[in-house]
Image (spheres, grey):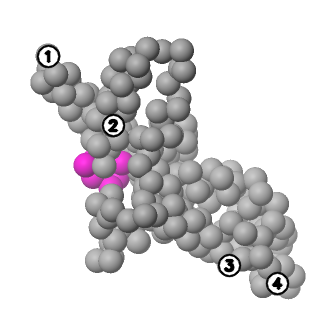
Amino acid sequence: MPSHALSSISLTVSHSPATPFDDIDSVVALYEQRIFRFLLVSTRDADLAQSLTQDTFLRAWSARASFRNECAVSTWLMRIAVNLLRDHTRTERFRFWKRATTTSVDVSDPAIHLIHLDSSAETRLIASEQLAIVWDTVARLSARQRSVFILRFVEELDLTEIATVTGLPVSTVKSHLYRALANIRARHSKATQDAL
């Protein structure tokens, strides 16, 4: 997020206790990439992810008086981002993962770079096809299953943190994660059998 995007915000606080969000520049510097990464993987649209990232920090700054240190700053920000994403997906203008525009990002492309460069061309091709199957399956999951999966395996949050971020009980988080993984395994298994 460009620092000038928040430059119009007055950071003087009158009659309210100090919060970590009073120094919004530090908060943005610490957490912007993590929030943006979650939103980019969730939306596969760089412009939308950037916009929602800015909205996350603006909303956090506006609601900073309600932050009571009951959870980590990163958890509170992630919860705001999840809620903004949920609100956005409810609108008719947003058709999740189906828009093909120049700003869309194929999340499987960066993952290809994670494959060891010394691998054979065949190994790299198989790995990239498997990653494509995983991400295609993730795109078909319900919104909650998708969010829980991304928070667990992309953001590497533990189940308690995911419960805090999503506002769901830990048992429900486990259930959504179990179903997401079962769907991914079933689709991967079917694709492997079809290839044989």
Residue at x-position 50% and y-position 24%: 115
Q: Do tag 3 and tag 4 residues touch (Cβ < 8 Å)?
A: no
Q: Position of residue 52 (x, y in %)?
A: 54, 68
Instruction: State the residue position of label 2.
Output: 132
In the structure shown, which secondary structural element does the residue marked by tag 4 occupy?
loop
Label disc, if present, on residue 10 of the rendered structure? 4
First in residue order: circle 1 vs circle 2: 2
Q: Within 10 angstroms of label 4, few (less than 14), some, or many (20 or more) residues?
A: few
Q: CA distance from mark 3 to mark 4?
A: 11 Å
Q: CA distance from mark 4 to mark 1?
A: 62 Å
First in residue order: circle 4 vs circle 1: 4
Whether residue 96 is visible: no
Mark 3 or 2: in front is 2
Instruction: State the residue position of label 3.
Output: 62
In the structure shown, which secondary structural element does the residue marked by tag 1 occupy?
loop
**Disc 2 residue type?**
Ala
Vertical arrangement, residue 68 with respect to residue 170, above or below: below
**Disc 1 residue type?**
Leu
Q: Do tag 3 and tag 2 residues touch (Cβ < 8 Å)?
A: no
Left or right, 98 with reference to 67 = left
* Span colored in magenta: 140-146
